[in-house]
Image: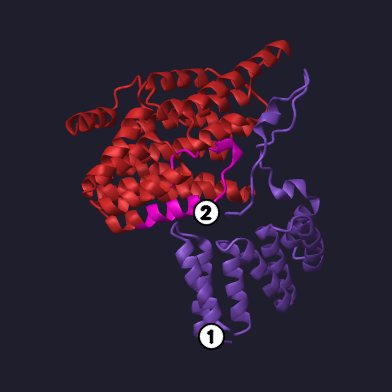
Amino acid sequence: MPSHIYSMVGLWEESVMSNWRSVAVANDYAAKAKLDGTLGGVPHAYDFIAYAYLQLGQDRKARGLIQESMAITKVIGVPLAGATARAAVPARYMLERQDWQGAAQLQPLGTGFPMAEAITHFARAMGAARSGNTAGAQADIEKLKEQRTALEKGGQGYWAGQVEIQILAAQAWMAQGQDNKSDALKFMRAAADLEDASEKHVAMENRLYPMRELLADMLMEQDEAAAALKEYEASLKNAPMRLRGFYGAAQAAEASGDAKKAREYFEKLARLTKNADGDRPDLREAKQRLASTR
Amino acid sequence: MIGARVVIGLLGLGLVLLPGRILADPTDEASKEQVDPEYAAGKAAIATKDWNAAIRSLSSAALRDTRNADIENYLGYAYRQSGDVKSAFVHYRRALQLNPRHRGAHEYIGEAYLMVNDLPKAEEHLTALERICLIPCEEYEDLKKAVAEYRVRGGK
């Protein structure tokens, strides 16, 4: 599936085009075959498109896909990929834009797939933890633990492992919010190492959010800019051309005194988001930094 | 348990359909025991403590699924319960080769080491579980309790 490859190498515009073609083919088939629902490949393609839009800073277009995705009432075929995609589209929208309040308010879809429900609970836990709502974060961490247990009991070891990674990351940010820096780093590093050591599943080939990038974000919050830069750059090797990866690397380079590298990353970010339609603070900052160093 | 299973498939296959016919979901990761009756039979035999039947069924399942740490762990357990600790060690080690983070295998091999009075090796696995279980797990608590009881008994 070429659209997967485009996404893996960060060719976002190609990914958008390829996935829209996939949607058109699927919908055309569904109409001709008189199917009474949406083929599972459609929400899956929406997820890839939303991810690509968010990397291009095209937030309005990404938001439109939340409505498209939520409008799907019946998925035919590939139910797992359909369920994970429908959960991932709104979760990505909140997490990529660092909209923690929005993330905390996401509602589980009740898909019946624990790995899909976990996506929403992870986003909610992250949103709550990063909004200072420890009780809310803990409640969603408990839900994640329930999903993990259900997956283990159901012999779904791979997905249980993926949910374990989400639990560790959510716990990390909760600890960070409680100023327990050492536990926060311990949990976050474990999440990043486990994710990097695990295979990708075709249903979630774009991982919800690179754990190593979250580790880098945490190091920045702990004023460890040099260590953060190293992690951002490691993350960008596995998940290239990410908006938040470039922004984080630029900030980390600047904070660790490498103005040349900081400028390079801000320039990459500016090129990546040249057609952005949103109003993200990180993009405004990038423009200001580049203007001030001309 | 986190398996090192390669879980790839071709989602696109889901779209290659004949009118009115839906193919199986290539992204669905059905439980191994759902697709292998020998695996299911082995687990059922363990539940009824029929260790010989469990060993027979699980050995057959392991021949088909050579990289399944869960099957190896169950085999280790069945051999241990049947009194063949030597064979149990073979399967527990195989489970841990396949998945070094397999919590059940760490617990059970630790308990097997206590059976052969090798406390240092049991403690190695307790330490491994402590490292793995950043999220508290019962496997760590169970082995910790077994090690403590072993000490109270004076190693008998």
Q: Position of residue B153 (x, y in %)?
A: 53, 85
Would residue B104 appear left or right of A93 to someone viewing this image?
A: right
Local crowd size for mark 2, using a 10 Å CA cut-off: few (<14), some (14–19), many (≥20): few
Colour mode of the rendering: by chain
The residue that disc 2 covers is: A197
Q: Position of residue A39 (x, y in %)?
A: 65, 22
Query: What is the drawing colour of chain A?
Result: red
Chain that the image shows in purple: B
Q: Position of residue A130 (x, y in %)?
A: 30, 40
Q: What amino acid does circle 1 point to?
A: Arg
Q: Is residue B85 depicted above or below B135 in this figure?
A: below
Residue B56 visible somewhere in the drawing: yes
The magenta stretch is: A186-211
Would residue A189 appear left or right of B64 to someone viewing this image?
A: left
Image quarter of the N terminus of chain A: top right
Q: Nearer the viewer, mark 2 or mark 1?
A: 2
Q: Main secondary structure of the magenta part?
A: helix
Tag 2 subunit: A
Image quarter of the C terminus of chain A: top left
Residue A127 visible somewhere in the drawing: no
Tag 1 subunit: B
Place residue A259 in its image quadrant. top left
Would residue A269 appear left or right of A40 to someone viewing this image?
A: left
Q: Position of residue A19 (x, y in %)?
A: 56, 23
Q: Is residue A226 depicted above or below B88 in this figure?
A: above
The residue that disc 1 covers is: B153
